[in-house]
Amino acid sequence: MASRVRKLHDFGQAPWLDFVDRRFLKEGGLQRLVEEDGVTGVTSNPSIFEKAIAHGDAYDAQLLALLQSRPGTSITQAYEALAVQDIQDAADTLQPVYERLNGTDGYVSLEVSPYLAESTEETVAEAQRLWRQIDRPNLMIKVPGTQAGVPAIRQLIEDGININVTLLFGQQSYAAVAMAFVEGLEARLAQGQPIDRIASVASFFVSRIDAAIDRKIAERLKSADAEAEALTGLRGQVAIANAKLAYQWYLGFVASERWQALAERGAMPQRLLWASTGTKDPSYPDTLYVDNLIGPETVNTLPPKTMDAFRDHGTLAPSLTAEVESARRILREVDRLGLDLPAVADELVRDGVKQFADAADALLGAVAAKRSAIVGDGLNSMHEALPRELDEAVEARLERMRQESWSRRLWAGDATLWTGGEEAKWLGWLAAGKGEQIDPEALKALGAQAAQYRSAVLLGMGGSSLGPEVLAEIVGPRSGSPMIHVLDTTDPKQIAAVAAAIDPEHTLFIVASKSGSTMEPELLRAYFWNLAGQDGSRFIAITDPGSRLAKIAHDHGYAGVFLGDPTIGGRYSVLSVFGMVPAAVMGMDVAEFFARVAPMVQSCAPDAPPAVNPGVRLGAILGEAANRGRDKVTVLTSPALRAFGAWLEQLLAESTGKQGRGIVPVDLEPPVPPAHYGSDRLFVLLSLSGDDHARLDAHADALVTAGQPVVRIALSSKEMIGQEFFRWEIATAVAGAVIGIDPFDQPDVEDAKIRTRVLIDAYEATGSLAPETPFFEDGRVAFFGPADRGHSGDNAVQILRTHLARPGPGDYVGFLLYVERNPANEALVARMRERVVKARHVATVAGFGPRFLHSTGQAYKGGPRSGVFLEITRTPDPDVPILGRKASFGTVQLAQARGDLDVLASRGQRVLRAHLQSASLSDLEELLDEALRN
Ligand SMILES: O=P(O)(O)OC[C@H]1O[C@](O)(CO)[C@@H](O)[C@@H]1O
Ligand SMILES: O=C[C@H](O)[C@H](O)COP(=O)(O)O
């Protein structure tokens, strides 16, 4: 006996299957339905593919093969490759049907990306691309019947592409779509193109209408509506009535002269297709939306469950044209009762687009997760353990980000993600992450040339020095390549130490400054220019086009000038020439380096939904933590990655620390037992496989047990540090959006520079710095501070005690040292920090001046006003003169310290400056120790 499903054909209706799945196709499921049930078509949508691909392993083998053969494949491309294969398989299964029915049936539908529903042009382009790629005559591309979709449908029909119009709910949009179909065909005819093989269906959604109307009715019934009985009578009636009237419109339409003219030229009608025919309300019969919509020249696409039910107990009768008057009456009732069907239809279109976009997000998320599993340790891992409240806030934020398409908007340069200001002009680092800002061949040649030098000295500040320093310290020069010294200071001892360590004859000097006008690299450039005998052949410059440095490099005959991208701010520049030129000098294979970075860039791509996008996810954590007072991002690393924090500090602080908000990075603070930490921290651990990180792990475990939020990041090799540059750049940009600031400006840095300049200019004029009076001195140490800040005490210990008693919960203590940055001084300040943390239970930061001025300085001045700073200065001895100037490097450094203090004080931060007279730094450490003892 013929199957009941097959018998639908007797009524002129084509049964299609609303389902696709790899295993089902491979096991011959579709073939069986074609043979046994007379199925003559297949529809898919993003939800169907989400169910197929995201759950189970049927697609994993193809995915693995794809990613192995083309590692650069994006998750959208990967999904598409999987879907395309299924659609081609289904089309091939239906090919005999298509042939037998002479192109009137036998179609398989694939939907364009739901993300494009508002863009006509992009929908057209994607439909054309999929059409070419799938390359089957019995393919239909599904395009939503939205406002933007209608002109796309017209265009695509004109192009000769079969179209399944999806998401139709209302009579009006159906009519618009039918006209678009006609116009497309007419346009073809006008061009002399054939129209007899252009197939189209208009997918009228059914069950979703009842679901929406029934919900409205239920709401009304809750409030004891006077029309309760009439409303109840409409439950489960409206969708079918709506569909029946759509069919009546169709009948009128195909009878029209306009259509008949096309029909005479061989045009096939655009059939109405009943979609969404699986019953949503279990109290309704499971074949409701099949039994009642049977009629000629139509299609019903049935989900497997509905098809099984219909096969089993469906009712075959020509129902579509029955009781049309009753359908009209029902819709009049809907109108009378104010249920507003057109509004419901509009809302269902919006919901439908969103629902498919949600499904696409889930699908892409699942593909991304599968890809991460395949990439394995080729992608640095990240795991977070967050206290419940923060965890919930992060998850809620990620969901909001998903709904608001943050990953896509970030890459698209949508400034409204931030403050709607200048942000879009500063996104060149995204392309730089893909290696697009450098010329690998030129860098290879540079690496070969650089091998002749014993050492290299890089002169730069902030973003121009910290990236190279991290690369030098973590990855290090290859054997045969020069040893690299990074100088980002005006400290005379530090400058002298580098000058003494090199042989200028065998040294390559790299002057790095985006602006080309930063004071420190300019002074250092002049100093080493003379030291190197003014021989330009041993100098190269890295700078932005048209800068003063570019001109000097040209005039001085530099061996090379590497130009940066002006749309990249300094702190985001490490993956541009600013990091990669020094890397090449160190003998790194830059192309190989970027090949390692690539999996992170792909994982952070615009199509990677926030929850599985490692950069966006981290950004959500950083931003939510900061907004909840956990604004001290405490960086802990395994030994080999120790240097990373210096780069990260600048990125986080300078990007987010403004308008009294932002993140205060805490780097190189010695770990202490969890009891000493407040509730203002977020801990980030970076560990390198094979490095000694057992203690670090134990510390992290203890922190988690104590309820502290911990993010753990693991690298499989030190070369993988490149991935962290990119992850953190994305994370910082995203955190900036969560915090609500522009992460690409640095509004408070300039002030300290101005104050310094005033002091130095005065020095050049008078030969001395403007006098200043300490509020206390004892010959060992002199103290300076704003008079109005209540500094008091009869001796150094008391003064320090008073100052260090200032921080309360959530505050932080900053040590700002204008002394040589060397291992001994670093160790000393680390000890001082440890004492403060233990005694005061607050976070501590430390910076060596003027280096930190171009890095964390922005956050200390513009960020949260929770800092308590101890600035430490001394009169440098021996000093280093600057040729052609009265001021020495030491004088400049002191002027910088004074300028810094002034600005910090003017911003309401609590500041004290200890100027070492006869006391050494160790002496100060003892005083501090005493001051912290009760
Ligand atoms: O590369 P440049 O222009 O010399 O700037 C160095 C650093 O100084 C700053 O502008 C801060 O003063 C940083 O943003 C930057 O990385
Ligand atoms: O083309 C088919 C439609 O996408 C499908 O029928 C929608 O069904 P649903 O409303 O059950 O999601």
Image: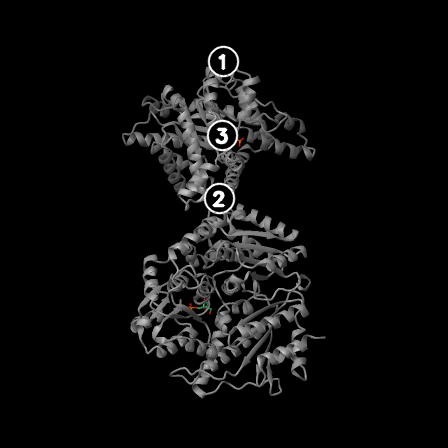
Say what amino acid the circle numbered 3 marks. Arg
Residue 862 lies in quadrant: bottom right
> Which residue was labeled with disc 2?
374
- Say which of marks 2 and 1 sits in front: 2
C-alpha distance separating marks 2 and 3: 21 Å
Camera-nearest residue between 695 and 750: 695
Image location of residue 249, percent across then percent down:
46, 25
Asked whether residue 826 is in view, the answer is yes
Colouring chosen for the image of the structure:
one colour
**Beta carbon at label 2 within 8 Å of ligand 2:** no
Q: Nearer the viewer, residue 639 or 850?
A: 639
Left or right, 720 with respect to 924, comes to left
Query: Considering the image in quadrants, where does the C terminus appear?
Result: bottom right
Mark 1 = which residue? 2
Upstream in the sequence, badge 2 or badge 3?
3
Q: Which mark is residue 23?
A: 3
Q: Is residue 256 above or below residue 662?
A: above
Mark 3 CB within 8 Å of ligand 2: no
